[in-house]
Amino acid sequence: MTETPPAPACFPVTVDVVALTVRDGQLNVLLITRLIDPFRGRLALPGGFVLAGEELLEAAGRELAEETGVGHLPGHLEQLGSYGPKGRDPRGDVLTVAHLLLAPDFPVLSAGSDAEHAAWYPVGQVLGGELQLAFDHGRILGDALERAKSKLEYSPLGAAFCGEEFTVAQLRAVYEAVWGTRLDPRNFHRKATGTPDFLEDTGRMTTGDAGRPAALFRLAPAARTAAGQPARAVLNPPLMRPRD
Amino acid sequence: MTETPPAPACFPVTVDVVALTVRDGQLNVLLITRLIDPFRGRLALPGGFVLAGEELLEAAGRELAEETGVGHLPGHLEQLGSYGPKGRDPRGDVLTVAHLLLAPDFPVLSAGSDAEHAAWYPVGQVLGGELQLAFDHGRILGDALERAKSKLEYSPLGAAFCGEEFTVAQLRAVYEAVWGTRLDPRNFHRKATGTPDFLEDTGRMTTGDAGRPAALFRLAPAARTAAGQPARAVLNPPLMRPRD
DNA sequence: GTATTTATCGTCACCTTGACAATAATTCGA
DNA sequence: TCGAATTATTGTCAAGGTGACGATAAATAC
């Protein structure tokens, strides 16, 4: 058999992004429709090659912005993990570094006809349905969901799905969508507002919605990074997700 | 994934391994002494280039085995995260995928004079002391420690530091070394033996040690993978680590 | 207005934790 | 050989967190 040359092993490196949001109480993931082979016509995670001189997070943010047409990405972006390089692309070995974006619902610009079309898809529909993702993106999505679920337990990252200010019920809807369970509103309210360094009352209230107005909260300073995004683990003991 | 750009961006890809163990009640990390520039003479994480046709975990295991001279790696190996490629190696952009090994203490073969010397170093000495790791390995080590600490909370992975069979006290020593705290032996015993699907009594006891003989446990089947290594998250509620 | 909806506050039993007493079963040392 | 020391294990108890659910507040819907 042929010997593998001892030359330093170089690989094409891509970044992929699992962008999650909650729309109408459903967890959604951002997917693009591939216009070229392999997997032409299939849905895939947005992503692309890392450019020279770029950091991984940077590349992930750039690719996502390019493919959705948004200027500034909302939400929290973090690295998920790396996959490959063996056997995940029929064209050859490609290493991909997957990322996870937890974001409030944002509109995806329907790009022109020659660009790949990006859109939100309900996660349940992607996993359970006949939709099959390109490459190993189904596995990556699965890992991303598991990460998202567990992050909500012990970090304030659920707030990344909400806007700057939000009600306890909106935050609860995030937990319910990500975990796929119903939570008792009263117990959730007690835990969310009672956990130190989690939520901060803005003093303002919602108006116009059905039912009693709700207090508006924002993330407490201790739960935010300098950039304003939720970061530090503060939920101790964790917000426990019901195990089956 | 997007269309292939004119010049697909390729990078040299390495794997690094943060191998942790507990020796004499102290958390230790496996480091090699670099024999070549850059950072000649400095301590660094073991690692090396990913070869064509290799998976990441495979490459990490191979490199670690090569540099320590052990045949079969004990313990639990998992991916930690990727770093770079920008600005971490003075010779150029290199992407590295860091890994984490939690293992029982194993002897490192002192390799010949021309090979890089691998040895265990107490983590406290590496972090606090004048020892400065090569490249961005100090940051990687820091991330690895944080990962290890949090894994012990909600997974049975502490047992990866022990052998096949172990006493509750040995497991407690692992927690104390990794977390850098003292734990009450009685409360730890209650939690460890009382958590379903965590420990399984072998029916055998220790002999010869000072004090009352201790019962020998192994990981419960539900906490093991097929390979025998601890895997599934079972500690719910978690084994809480004392926060400052 | 009255019904409905949603938010928020309380209550209570149960469970887990942290602190610590008590007992068991061995080795160590005189 | 016999206490002393050491380590393991079982309990006890108060404090705090959780799950289940009643009750009340404050808006919109009809």
Image (cartoon, coloured by chain):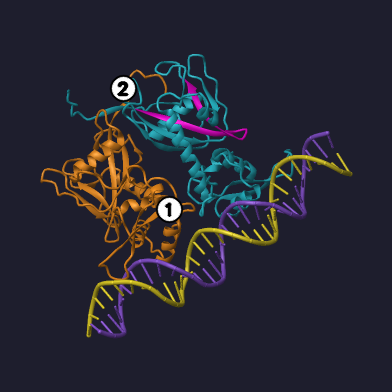
Chain colours: A cyan, B orange, C yellow, D purple
Q: Position of residue B215 (x, y in %)?
A: 34, 62
Q: At label 2, which amino acid type do we have? A: Gly
**Can marks 2 and 1 be said to lie on one chain?**
no
Q: Horizontally, is A132 left or right of B178 in the view?
A: right
Which residue sits at x=39%, y=18%?
A38
Chain name for mark 1: B
Query: According to the image, label 2 marks what residue?
Result: A92
In this rendering, the answer to whether A64 lies above or below B7 is below
Q: Which mark is residue B153?
A: 1
Which residue sits at x=74%, y=38%?
A208
Which residue sits at x=25%, y=67%?
B208
Q: Position of residue B240 (x, y in %)?
A: 46, 57
Q: At label 1, which amino acid type do we have? A: Glu
Tell me which segment is drawn in magenta. A13-33
Q: Is residue A51 visible?
A: yes
Q: Nearer the viewer, residue B198 or D16?
A: B198
Q: Horizontally, is C2 left or right of A154 in the view?
A: right
Q: Position of residue B144 (x, y in %)?
A: 35, 47
